[in-house]
Image (spheres, rainbow, N blue to C red):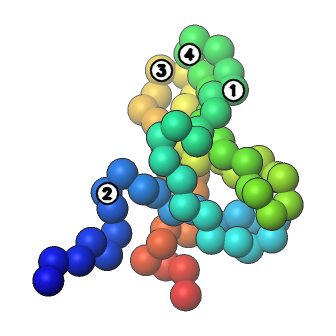
Amino acid sequence: MVKVERDGRIRYVKCNNCNSVLSFKKEDEHYQGEENWGRMYITCPCCNSSVTVFESEGYDYMKNYSKARIEDIK
């Protein structure tokens, strides 16, 4: 039987405030910023803190600011 271990559309990040491992999809992300800078973030349901997922500065590429990927979380 084929089993999906991890869906490619679901991403994971660790909350730096309460150390919860969060899964989210694109529609869960919120944008804060202007035309040439900004950040994508989600809200942690445990502690209501803002968890930055991506951040861009200027016309630079989107940088991944998540400090721990799911592979690194034990």
Residue 53 can be seen in this image: yes
At label 1, the amino acid type is: Gln
The residue mark sitting in front, 3 or 1, is: 1
The reply to whether dot 3 and dot 4 touch (C-beta < 8 Å) is yes
Of the two numbered discs 2 and 3 on the same chain, state the one appearing first in sequence: 2
Comes first in the chain, label 4 or label 2: 2
Give the structural element (helix, strand or loop) at label 3: loop
Residue at position x 23%, y 77% in the image: 3
Q: Quadrant of residue 46?
A: bottom right
Residue placed most toward the observer, 14 or 36: 14
Res. 67 in view: no
Looking at the rendered structure, the kind of residue marked 2 is Gly
Query: Label 3 vs label 4: CA separation?
Result: 6 Å
Q: CA distance from mark 2 to mark 1?
A: 25 Å
> Under tag 4, what secondary structure?
loop
Report which residue position mark 1 lands on: 32
Q: Nearer the viewer, mark 2 or mark 1?
A: 2
Q: Which residue is mark 4?
A: 36
- Work out whether 59 lies above or below 8: above
Q: Position of residue 35 (x, y in %)?
A: 57, 12
Q: Earlier in the sequence, mark 3 or mark 1?
A: 1
Determine the secondary structure under disc 1.
Answer: strand
In this picture, residue 12 sits left or right of residue 5: right
Where is residue 1? Give x, y as percent: 14, 83
The kind of residue on which mark 4 rests is Asn
* Disc 2 crowd, CA 10 A, few/some/many (<14, 14-19, 20+): few
Residue to which mark 3 is pinned:
59
For the residues labelled 2 and 3, the Cα–Cα distance comes to: 27 Å
Q: Which residue corresponds to the image point at 55% horizontal and 32% vertical from the top-left?
A: 56
Q: Residue beneath label 2, please?
A: 8
Q: Residues within 10 Å of mark 3 (few under 14, many from 20)?
A: few
